Image: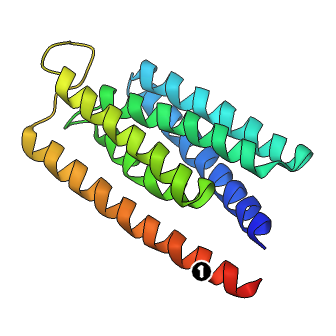
Amino acid sequence: LDVLRKHFLLNLIGILGAIFLGSFSVIAMIQGEFTLALADLTLLLCVVSLVVRLRLHKNPQSIALFGTLVTGSFYLFLVSYSGLEKPTYLWSLTYPLISLYLLGRKLGSFISFLLLGTCCLSFWLAPHFDIFQQYESRLIIRFISVYLLIQFFAFVAEIIHDMTQKRLE
């Protein structure tokens, strides 16, 4: 049952991700945001290849881990590249859901907190390096608070999932 759940989630995330990434890459190109369009297209190709690989090889755990790490890198790029006028950083708030639902409580939490930590490093480095987008302190506090809240709810959902799974066995 858990393998079926993971296959379903990977396919759902992959298909929805491909639709959004394709749309956003076209929008970014139209707006002249070629760096963002290239990043969107790169992740789109990666997502499509992972969905194809899942259907051919049926190995959800390695695909979930690789896909989650690649998505986390993409989200870190969005946080570092984005800004108040470009709200692409908001997509990174979905990461705790993706990482915990696909990787489980322990590994998913570790990877999710790793992204949050690197985002915080990006926030801290921004005033010192022009390559990082600088955010207002109020926005950083709100971002971290919402991220942690989503992390908490995803963690609780995974605890409930594990308890349900044990009762079914």
Residue 72, relative to residue 160: is it above or below?
Answer: above
Residue 6 is drawn in which quadrant? bottom right
Residue at 63% over, 83% down: 164
Residue at 53 percent across and 60 percent down: it is: 105
Q: Position of residue 168 (x, y in %)?
A: 74, 86
Q: Is residue 71 left or right of residue 28?
A: right
Residue 107 in view here: yes
Q: Circle 1 sits on which residue?
A: 163
Res 88 quadrant in image: top left
Instruction: Report x, y in % for residue 58.
Output: 87, 50
Comparing 66 with 9, the one in front is 66
Secondary structure beneath dot 1 equals helix
Tell me which amino acid carries mark 1: Met
- Decide: is 84 above or below 19: above
Residue 124, image x, y percentages: 18, 27
**Viewer-nearest residue: 115 or 43:** 115
Total count of labels: 1
Q: Position of residue 114 (x, y in %)?
A: 41, 39
Residue sitting nearer the eye, 62 or 159 = 159
Q: Residue at x 23, y 49 (%)?
A: 143
- Identified at 61% across, 74% down, the residue is 162
Q: Quadrant of the C terminus?
A: bottom right
**Taking 84 as reference, is 164 above or below it?**
below
Compared across the picture, whether 145 is left or right of 151 comes to: left
